[in-house]
Amino acid sequence: MNAAALLRAVAVLALTLTAGCAHVPDTTLRQDPPAVAFTALQRPFDGARLAVDPQTQAARWQRANSADWLDPITEQPQARWLNGFVDLDDVPTYLATSRKQRALPVLVAYAIPNRGCSNYREGLPYGDYDRATPRPDSYAAWIGELVNRLGPTHAVVVLEPDALPADCFDDERAATLKGAVDDLTSAGHHVYIDAGHSSWRPSGEIAQRLLRSGVDRAEGVSLNVSNRYPTWSVADFGEELSELIGGRDYIIDSSRNGSTVTGTDPASLSNDWCNRPDQALGVQELGTPDATRWPHLAAQLWIKLPGESDGNAAVFPQQDCHGETALPGVFSAKQARELILNDPLQPAKVRSKVRAASLSG
């Protein structure tokens, strides 16, 4: 067995061993599989390869600082986030890179009105604190322009992290999401509506919101985006949720969930979310590591870009951000270093190289 195969076997074994602490199924708001007409699943990840984006913040920092120790992050596929109209300008270049690699592009649409449920006063550095109040029709125009920029290329679109489980979800937001699902799927794209994580809201409540938001036409849901819950815990929740939404598939953000010491205690993970020190790179895999237990797990992906800060004391003065100085969404060499060093699947020689490297290059 070569080194790569051995590391993969260890990862599968770790999932199996931790599976004894399974997610506790939701017993509230449960319902029979809904009597709606679901579109056939396309399963875009079957036989696919994912694009390695040379324009992530980490990749640009690596080139500027000749920091080859960042290879465990920069040489891996990661999603491309789109936060507004300005980000659409780079979509054609990203698609050209994907085509050159014969890879499936993965995009994150993250521009829904009232994104942070704060009456359009998101505050720095989220970028929309001083703009005119966005309307659902302006969001529809943004989705329409995204469809135009994608052209004939079919992409995976992770739709609006946190928007559906958020406190400000209402009929208007459901209709806005449904409109986006309709427009994207009509153009041939594979939509995964974000559904939060296993410790946010009960699966029955999330399922009802998903049904109002067009999940019948979507490929499925995304889970754990920008969070650190272990794959096995999230996958148990994903299967429970899938039963309530017609057997839709789900994908899991594994970009920072690879630590073997991170627990699943909701209080711990929800209260210590700002650059917590025990985060680690997680396993990327198309398909499921256990088709019997998690038959609807379509992929583990790096959706949140590894190395980007969650925030600092200037933005979140009442939150312990563990000494990080970078603003939310800004690349931090400190964060990247911790993610690599804490990854139990990284070879010893890689960790030694990272320890010896200067954070300035």
Image: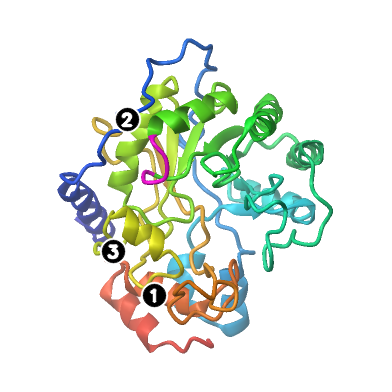
Q: Which residue does the numbered mark 2 point to in the structure image?
A: 295
| Callout 1 touching callout 2 (CB < 8 Å) | no
Res 7 → quadrant: bottom left
Closer to the chain start, of discs 1 and 2, is 2
Closer to the chain start, of discs 3 and 1, is 1
Residue 137 position in % (x across, y down): 81, 36
Residue 176 appears in the picture as rendered: yes
Q: Residue at x 67, y 26 (%)?
A: 182
Amino acid tagged 2: Pro
| Callout 3 touching callout 1 (CB < 8 Å) | no
Position of 116 with respect to 204 (left or right) is: right
In reply to whether residue 239 is colored magenta, the answer given is: no
Of marks 2 and 3, the one in the foreground:
2
Q: Residue at x 46, y 33 (%)?
A: 206
Q: Main secondary structure of the magenta part?
A: loop
Position of 299 with respect to 326 (left or right) is: left
Q: Which mark is residue 338?
A: 1
* Secondary structure type for disc 1: helix
Amino acid tagged 1: Glu
Q: Which mark is residue 345?
A: 3
Alpha carbon of mark 2 to alpha carbon of mark 3: how far?
24 Å
- Magenta segment: 198-202
